[in-house]
Image (cartoon, rainbow, N blue to C red):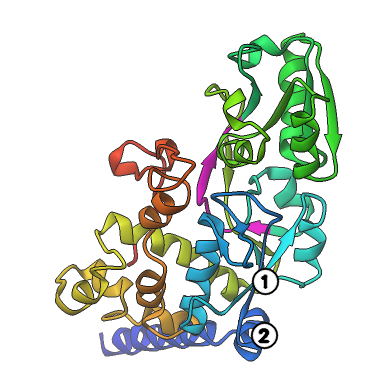
Amino acid sequence: MSRLSLALAAALSCLCGAASAQQLVPSPTLDAIKARGHLECGVHLGLPGFSFANDKGEWSGIDVDYCRALAAAILGDSTKVKFTPTSVQQRWPVLQSGQVDLLSRNTTITFSRNATLGVNFQGINFYEGQTFVVRKGTATAPKDLDGASICVAAGSTEEKQAADWFRERNMKTSIINFQKNDDAIAAYDSGRCDAYTAGLGALAGQRSKLKDPDSHVVMTETISNDPQGPTTRYGDERYQLVVRWVLNGMIAAELLGITSKNVDEMKAKSTSAEVRRLLGVDGGFGAMMGLSNDWMFNAIKQVGNYGESYERTVGMGSPLKLARGKNELWTKGGALFTPPFQ
């Protein structure tokens, strides 16, 4: 019996040693971020509600908020972010070359991208669906676009999905692609196309750029399911862990009722084991990744939970006024969920 006990103790010692060693695995990306003192984040060229810079160069949007939360978790300061605008074509080389630490822009998660581009998707921060913007009185649903010309950004998932959708229904359309989203929407606005296609959320923001937004309508029927989320390069698993769990932490905070306004009180008084682990009171979860244990406390305090971010950037508190829909918590009928902080 004593031999068995000794064997078990030795095995547990090896496991604990392996766990400790795993925590110390080098992370070149985290080391680089800490050394330079800021996060390099690749964002959209300019999409209201998602990533958009005003005339003072101040960035806002749900994707921008995520970058700020990540900076707060890693560096303790949500302002320590440099934003690099990227086009549809530029985003992959910019990420792959190391010019940015991650992409946080409206990029659809697909099998082929994951398998062939050397990138990993670290969760879903927005459930998108492709649809069309048209001039009022011309069409009400995608099926009405038979024979239409459609503007789209070249190299986007929308370009391929639109072609597939119409071909599968034996509908004749002319897909006209442009190097940039802004070029495509400008071409539509000038009358070169009958419709412009993109994600529902993206169209809500892009419609505001049209000369006369009220003369155009965004269809409510979608032709795809396009989940989007932060994207990293292959390799550096410890950094990927951080990127993934900061997003999970923002979602978990909303689920657990933690907000930027009550986070101090929740940290001081909550008896919930999961709340205490999330906010760094117990568990040492930050240390497991090489961060301070108040990593998510800082992110929530300075940026907010997922729901707070959604409402002020694309939700009812924003000009876009997008209902939560699939982006609601799973406990409220949506698709948004997170694994537990255990």
Q: Position of residue 314 (x, y in %)?
A: 47, 46
Query: Mark 2 or mark 1: which comes first in sequence?
Result: 2
Which residue is painted at 61% across and 24% down in the image?
Answer: 215
- Check if residue 121 falls in the magenta segment: yes
Q: Position of residue 43 (x, y in %)?
A: 66, 59
Disc sitting over residue 43 in the figure = none
Q: Position of residue 135 (x, y in %)?
A: 66, 20
Residue 35 vs 134, above or below: the answer is below
Q: CA distance from mark 2 to mark 1?
A: 9 Å
Q: Mark 2 packing: few (<14 Cα in 10 Å), some, or many (20+)? A: few
Which residue is painted at 54% across and 21% down in the image?
Answer: 221
- Check if residue 21 falls in the magenta segment: no
Secondary structure, mark 1, is loop
Can you tell which quarter of the image residue 271 is in?
A: bottom left
Numbered-mark total: 2
Q: Position of residue 79 (x, y in %)?
A: 52, 77
Q: Are marks 2 and 1 in contact (CB under 8 Å)?
A: yes
Q: Mark 1 packing: few (<14 Cα in 10 Å), some, or many (20+)? A: many
Q: Which residue is mark 2?
A: 32
Can you tell which quarter of the image residue 190 is in?
A: top right
Left or right of 2, for residue 198 = right
Which residue is painted at 57% across and 23% down in the image?
Answer: 219
Identify the image quadrant of the N terminus: bottom left
Q: Which residue is mark 1?
A: 101
The residue segment tinted magenta is 120-130
- The residue furthest front is 212
